[in-house]
Image (cartoon, helix red, strand yellow):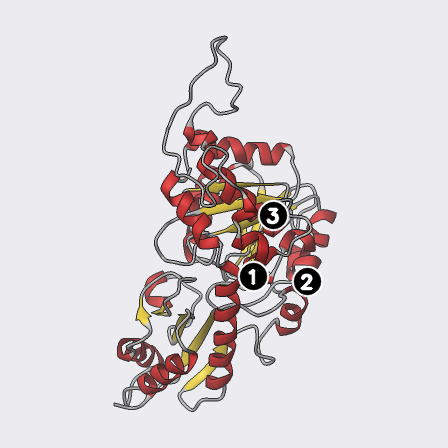
Amino acid sequence: MDHKPYHPDSIAAQGMGWIDDATRAVIPPLHVSTTYLRDEDNQYRSGRVYARADNPAFDQPEAVINALEGGHQTLLFSSGMAAATAAFQALRPGDHVLAPQVMYWSLRNWLTTFATDWGLQVELIDMTSPAAVQAALRPGQTRLVWIETPANPLWTVTDIADTAVRCHAAGALLAVDSTVATPVLTRPLALGADLVMHAATKYLNGHSDLIAGALVTREDSPYWQRVRKVRAQLGGTLGSFEAWLLLRGMRTLPLRVRAASASALRIAEHFHGHPQIAEVLYPGLVSCQGHAVSQRQMVGGFGGMLSLRVKAGAAVAGSSGEQAAIAVAARTRLWKRATSLGGTESLIEHRASIEGPGTPVPNDLLRLSVGLEQVDDLIADLTSALTLA
């Protein structure tokens, strides 16, 4: 399939429309070989040497992600963390990097421990503030600026286009964690970003049955070649079966993301102003930070993630906000108490308990990943859980 004339939905549904040459199968075969035969003159004209870097199972899912994001090239990794850390490991000790104060906790923790021990100068700032970004940039010294939008788990929004202009003026690259927005709702490269990261475990796969990550670059560069070497030499590559599952999951990506986004908006609007809810955090609400920016850079929805801050006294009389939030999560039946997001099942989590000491997350906050259940059932389940026992 020449993907250029086709809508992204068509590209995803047909997995680029590739047909197996050997069998004419519509669904690709599963390649499990780890090694490949040399030619008689000792060359590798097939282009494949060893599966860690040259696995044919990667070709189709990487091509689909690349087409959806409009990138130059995509690399699959063994996890979202492997993809994200590779972007930083391709830098040099002493390089200055900027990252958000509110972001995916595991990467935040890695940046403030391993990355700083390795020699990166890591500065966490309020990425939603253009003034803060401008003040923190060090022309000629800042090498990479990392943003996450919407940012987990407060769902704050950063203006990608504005940040890209500021970064490039200072000689820095801009990388965007677009896991929650997905290429269905936001295409960061078209807005000026240099790199896009996906925790493909989440929405790209969408079935909670594999761990994967991806990086997409806007153009080739010495920096991108170092990223490629990090993947090949440190071994953070995906297994063949996981790559096959990822491709299968992406065929329904647009349908799943739009359905989850529509339900999340319904839930956010329903509980906005609810007597037991102190605040609803969702970029689709006019009252939320970054709504105007979201309208510009998110097309067709605002994502399937939201958070609720539970009032003291909800669910259990005399409870604190933290106690009430934990009690609400415990009393849900349809919402499942589990970490992760982007699957077909709806998940609820008291996020501060997961992140532990030092988290910027309020202790009365519940993070919700909206799945594909009937939205009225999800609303009724939460309403029942919020009712005083």
Q: Secondary structure at mark 2?
A: helix
Q: Quadrant of the C terminus?
A: bottom left
Judge whether residue 115 can be spotted in this image: no
Which residue in the structure is indicated by mark 1?
149
Give the label, 1 or 3, closer to the camera.
3
Task: Give the quarter of the image for residue 117.
Answer: top left
Mark with earlier residue (1, 3): 3
Decide if residue 191 is on the left or right side of residue 79.
right
190 lies above or below 306: above
Extreme-top residue of the structure: 41
Residue at x-position 52% and y-position 48%: 15
Q: Secondary structure at mark 1?
A: loop
Which residue in the structure is indicated by mark 2?
131
Which of 343 and 115 lies nearest the eye of the viewer? 343
Distance between mark 2 and mark 3 Cα atoms: 34 Å
Task: Give the quarter of the image for residue 178.
Answer: bottom right
* x and y percentages locating residue 226 in the rendered image: 55, 32
Which residue in the structure is indicated by mark 3?
67
Residue at x-position 48% and y-position 37%: 20
